[in-house]
Image (cartoon, rainbow, N blue to C red):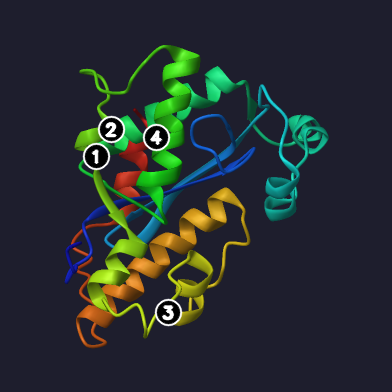
């Protein structure tokens, strides 16, 4: 049973990906979205795209609307990496935020986003992500779906737990299958879940200026 959070951790990192398909063992991420919140306040974000080494399935394209041609065209205005460079950057961000004490927040983030990252890292980088530099197993993870099950275990009352449903339930603007927007939506869902756990009372204490953290991280 997942923990019910009564307080928001000081530092949290929303994480989401859009992919070439749904198989974590054979597909690739084509975009990564990260957003950091300190004391519940957004302080940093990054989104980048990846030109994959395999086709984008028709089903995935219907979800996020991106084709290989779209990704190629983004080179003019966005950061577009190779698969190797995208994996390396994503691992670096997760590593750095873990070192800062962050909790990683997402929707089905363990079974999908992080598992695809792990498998892709093995096949592309030859790294299993269990070494001294970065070990996936020690990440502090909050999955908003699991957290919602802890809040309301009844599957009859809530037969669906996907992010779109949770956005509607908690009054959060949906991300629309954009990696950064979906990462933000997951964090906002969590913040509303904590408020619900406290009978409608927020439990945030802005003890320091979040901008101090932005300057600290960007200097790393």
Label for residue 108? Answer: none
Measured in 3D between alpha carbons, the distance from the residue under mark 4 to the one under mark 3, in whole angstroms, is 32 Å
Dot 3: few (<14), some (14–19), or many (≥20) neighbours within 10 Å?
Answer: some
Q: Single out the mark in the foreground, 1 or 4.
A: 1
* Residue drawn 77% across the image and 33% down it: 68
Dot 4 and dot 2 residues touching (CB under 8 Å): no
Which SS class for mark 4? helix
Mark found first going from the N terminus, 3 or 2? 2
Label 2, on which residue? 136
Label 1, on which residue? 139
- The residue nearer to you, when weighing 158 against 132, is 158
Q: Single out the mark in the foreground, 3 or 2.
A: 2
Label 3, on which residue? 170
Residue lying furthest top? 126
Dot 4 and dot 3 residues touching (CB under 8 Å): no
Measured in 3D between alpha carbons, the distance from the residue under mark 2 to the one under mark 1, in whole angstroms, is 6 Å
Measured in 3D between alpha carbons, the distance from the residue under mark 4 to the one under mark 2, in whole angstroms, is 23 Å
- Could one spot residue 192 in this view of the protein? yes
Q: Is residue 38 left or right of residue 15?
A: left
Quadrant assignment, res 5: bottom left
Dot 2 and dot 1 residues touching (CB under 8 Å): yes
Label 4, on which residue? 218
Mark found first going from the N terminus, 4 or 2? 2
* Residue drawn 28% across the image and 32% down it: 136
Measured in 3D between alpha carbons, the distance from the residue under mark 3 to the one under mark 2, in whole angstroms, is 29 Å
Dot 4: few (<14), some (14–19), or many (≥20) neighbours within 10 Å?
Answer: few
Measured in 3D between alpha carbons, the distance from the residue under mark 1 to the one under mark 3, in whole angstroms, is 26 Å
Mark found first going from the N terminus, 1 or 4? 1
């Amino acid at each position: 049973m997942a923990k019910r959070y009564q307080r928001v951790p000081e530092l949290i990192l929303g994480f989401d990906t859009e992919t070439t398909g749904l198989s974590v063992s054979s597909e690739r991420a084509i975009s990564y979205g990260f957003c950091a919140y300190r004391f519940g306040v957004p302080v940093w974000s990054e989104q980048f795209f990846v030109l994959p080494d395999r086709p984008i399935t028709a089903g995935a394209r219907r979800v996020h609307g991106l084709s290989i041609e779209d990704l190629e065209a983004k080179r003019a205005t966005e950061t577009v990496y190779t698969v190797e460079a995208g994996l390396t950057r994503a691992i670096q961000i997760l590593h750095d935020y873990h070192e800062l004490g962050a909790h990683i927040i997402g929707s089905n983030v363990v079974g999908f986003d992080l598992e695809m990252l792990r498998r892709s890292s093995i096949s592309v980088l030859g790294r299993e992500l269990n070494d001294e530099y970065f070990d996936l197993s020690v990440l502090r993870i909050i999955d908003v779906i699991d957290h919602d099950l802890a809040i309301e275990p009844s599957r009859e009352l809530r037969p669906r737990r996907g992010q779109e449903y949770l956005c509607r339930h908690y009054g959060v603007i949906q991300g629309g299958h954009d990696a950064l927007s979906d990462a933000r939506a997951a964090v906002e869902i969590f913040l509303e879940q904590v408020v619900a756990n406290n009978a409608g009372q927020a439990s945030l204490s802005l003890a320091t200026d979040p901008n101090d953290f932005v300057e600290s991280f960007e200097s790393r």
